[in-house]
Image (cartoon, rainbow, N blue to C red):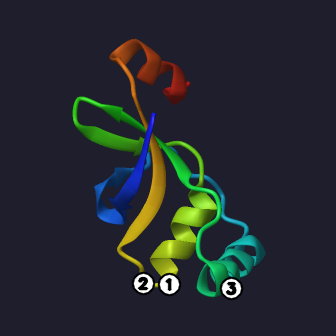
Amino acid sequence: MRQKLVRLSEINRPHQTPIDEAKVTRLMESIREIGLQEPIDLLEMEGKLYGFNGCHRFTAHKRLGLDTIKANIRQVDRATFRLHLL
């Protein structure tokens, strides 16, 4: 697993998770004050990045107008990727 800054526009989000607006607001305040403390986790398959968690952190970054987010990236094969789609 490697950590790096990733452009939000490069992240595919296959699942739409309901957003808790209060949580996003708190995260936005925290990110403004001290930065992102916990990177999101991404899967990389065939050169594309997919996010299955961290939706509130992702949304907070978008609403703050930030272009990038810290992410832990793990490369996976198709079989492993399919498990995350269930």
- Estimate how packed mark 3 is, as few (under 14), some (14 to 19) or many (20 or more) residues with alpha carbons within 10 Å: few
Identity of the amino acid at label 1?
Leu
Residue that extends furthest to the top in the rendered view of this protein = 79
Seen in the image, is 65 located left or right of residue 38?
A: left
Instruction: Check disc 2 and report its element: helix, strand or loop.
Output: loop
Q: Toward the viewer: 79 or 39?
A: 39
Residue located 54% across and 69% down the image: 59
**Residue 27: x percent and y percent?**
68, 75
Q: Are marks 3 and 2 in contact (CB under 8 Å)?
A: no
Q: Toward the viewer: 22 or 4?
A: 4
- Specify the quadrant that holds the C terminus: top right
Label 1, on which residue? 64
For residue 29, the mark is 3
Mark positioned earlier in the residue sequence (1 or 3): 3
Q: Is residue 81 above or below residue 34?
A: above
Q: Is residue 82 above or below residue 71?
A: above
Identity of the amino acid at label 3?
Glu
Instruction: Check disc 3 and report its element: helix, strand or loop.
Output: helix
**Residue 83: x percent and y percent?**
52, 19
Seen in the image, is 12 located left or right of residue 37?
A: left
